[in-house]
Amino acid sequence: MSENIRSTNLRFNLDKDVQNRAWQYLQTMDKKKFKSYSQIIAISLVDYFDRYYKKQDEPYLETREREERFVEQIVTAVENAMNRTLPVYLAGCMVGIAQITPQVAVATSEPEDADLDWDFLGE
């Protein structure tokens, strides 16, 4: 055995819900993705303890992650709604613009602001 390999035994009590579920996951895991029990157990332990220690350092980690997921869901929903409705809205605007006839302003001899008292500006 190599110096860099450590061996341990695992025991699952199938009468306990969490251990039974863990055993069932091991029995039904995708063998193409997870090559061995050792690989999936190592990945699971690292993930579990990384999150555990992050929560110790940052107690609101899970709350912030849930908020970020919620915001992402809102952004995605708005993007999807805009993707569905914006083309129709813009097409309607373009049709409306095409139907507007240009208005020509008629110039008068006296500007509209001729009767304003401009003294308030000071000199």
Image (spheres, helix red, strand yellow):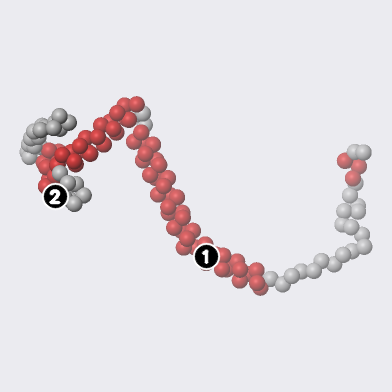
Q: Residue at x 43, y 49 (%)?
A: 74
- Decide: is 92 above or below 61: below
Across and down, in percent, residue 68 comes to 40, 42
Q: Quadrant of residue 42?
A: top left
Q: Secondary structure at mark 1?
A: helix
Left or right, 103 with respect to 48, comes to right
Who is closer to the viewer here, 113 or 93? Answer: 93
In primary-sequence order, the first of circles 1 and 2 is: 2
Who is closer to the viewer here, 49 or 108? Answer: 49
Read off the residue under disc 2.
28
Q: Secondary structure at mark 2?
A: helix
Left or right, 91 with respect to 41, comes to right
- How much space separates mark 1 and mark 2, taking CA atoms? 46 Å
Number of the label disc, if any, that sits on residue 32 = none
Q: Residue at x 87, y 65 (%)?
A: 107
- Quadrant (top left/top right/bottom left/bottom right) for the N terminus: top left
- Quadrant (top left/top right/bottom left/bottom right) for the C terminus: top right
Left or right, 24 with respect to 70, comes to left
Number of the label disc, if any, that sits on residue 87 = 1
Count of numbered labels shown in the rendering: 2
Amino acid at circle 1 = Pro
Q: Residue at x 39, y 45 (%)?
A: 70
Q: Residue at x 87, y 53 (%)?
A: 113
- Decide: is 14 above or below 108: above
Q: Is residue 21 visible?
A: no
Q: Residues within 10 Å of mark 2 (few under 14, many from 20)?
A: few
Q: Is residue 100 visible?
A: yes
- Decide: is 15 above or below 113: above
